[in-house]
Amino acid sequence: MELVRTTQRLWGRRSVLATLVVRDLRIRYAQSVLGYVWTVLDPLLMSLIYFVVFVYIFKRGDLGHQPYFLFLIVGLLAWQWFSTVLTDTSRALTGEAKLVRSTNLPREIWVVRVVLSKGVEYLLSLPVLLAFLLFYLVRGEAQLNAWLLLFPVAVALQAVALLGFGLVLAPLTVLVTDMQRVVRIVLRMLFYATPVIYATHLVPAPYDKITWLNPMTGILEMMRAGFFEHDRLPIVWGSVVTAVVVSFVMLLVGVAVFRRLERAVLKEI
Amino acid sequence: MTEPVISVEGLGVEFYRSRRRRLSVREMLFRGSSGTSKETFWALRDVSFDIHPGEAVGVVGGNGGGKSTLLKMIAGVLLPDEGTVTVNGGVAPLIELTGGFVGDLTARDNVYLLAGLHGVSKEAVDERFDEIVAFAGPQVKAGLDTPYRHFSSGMKVRLGFAVVTTLDEPIVLVDEVLAVGDKAFREKCYKRMEDLLSDGRTLFLVSHSERDLRRFGDRALYLRHGRLAVDGSMDEVLDQYNADLERNA
């Protein structure tokens, strides 16, 4: 099967993949003192803004689980991983055109590398989440439950989904020049169409099924499952199941599309 | 006869003639068509040959003859539309030498990075690091710990050449890179390539310089409009090529 063969080829070049990921992280962190701060500052500030807007201006602190600020951070950190990977994979091949043209590596590596290095950045930002969690735990406003086990599963699932999306976007951007703009606009719309700043349970009936199709809906539901009480906003299991299915289907589609377009892409870069 | 290291059979690759091959969502939406012409041409077609270990093969031909395209096919950075290219063994491609370097990292880091991209382990680079730097020259050595973007373009290419030629690959592909660098460095490159050849490596060279070709190649392929016109000894091929040039002049 295509997926197995691709995985084997990539596994054979895992040291190169490691080199690329380390390179990305070094550029990100070693170059400036603020490197780390930048990656966590963005989701933190956005959480703060949404918190102020919804809680103090709209007086709607009930849009998500309590504490709402913790709810926002869980969502925005994951969303940052999602959106940076999509923006970056859409230029994964064009941005490294010289390297793609001069090294005979499995071309999928350029996408996998973005997903992984952004994934590591995401994992490195988790201490911030942990800090806020401890803060709310000490104050007795948050509580953990056994569904916390779903968190690592959700992280893995998000990586699968991102690989799928990235493998479609990277070759498409080479062939369709204004794809990057399209991705940017769609991402901005998708942000509000994904339960990042509101709870999945609050999406009204026929639209809830539509938001499920976006795997991020179910992934966020899994990530949040362990942190909050679910008496008011129960876990939407339908979204979780859909996310698992969609993510893996997306990965298969991505591998197939990439294979299909690879020949044409190489002629264009 | 030994097994060929490079075996090319019925190779063909088709390109779009129009520069506006690239599509755009805007055009598709507003014009209902991709707005690009479907006209294509074959950059290479029906090309077949075998290269055996230790051979030094030059590729000759006018602009647009398909030389670089052929080289990219062998390097595996282009995929054929027809036929097959089989390469047994690793390839050290002297193409886009500086492509793997990152401006913000130091030259030292960049050496490890580029070698790593070609699959060399950190320990192996440690071992050869001095050799690489010595080859790249004193200017590079002095600037090892400064950001790579402060290097002159000549120094960049030297460093790239030094790294790629230290790769232990049995096949070396060279695309016009000898044209860069000053005279002294060029001599060093020639020397390095002769060493590689006497080491039993297979050399595949694209060049417009008759002198370079004669110096390294004993066999040559003459590509004319994407077809393999002659496959023979270097002298034979160059004579034919020059005769063609005169006839068209």
Image (cartoon, rainbow, N blue to C red):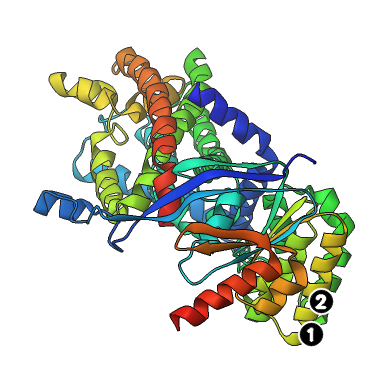
Q: Is residue A52 visible?
A: no
The chain letter under disc 1 is: B
Which residue, given by chain and number where applicable, does mark 2 sit on?
B188
Is A255 on the left or on the right of A183, as rendered? right
Residue B188 image-quadrant placement: bottom right
- Front residue of B207 and A220: B207
Q: CA distance from mark 1 to mark 2?
A: 7 Å
Q: Amino acid at mark 1?
A: Ala
Q: Nearer the viewer, residue A157 or A231?
A: A157
Residue drawn at x 51%, y 74% is: B244
Q: Which chain hosts label 2?
A: B
Q: Find residue A55 and report its image quarter.
A: top left
Q: Residues within 10 Å of mark 2 (few under 14, many from 20)?
A: few
Residue B209, horizontal then vertical, whole percent? 64, 78
Q: Position of residue A100 (x, y in %)?
A: 54, 53
Q: Is residue A114 left or right of residue B75?
A: left
Q: Residue furthest left?
A: B31
Relative to A252, residue B36 above or below? below
Q: Residue B169 at what x, y percent from top left?
A: 77, 51
Q: Quadrant of the C terminus of chain A?
A: bottom left
Name the residue type under label 2: Lys
* Number of marks: 2
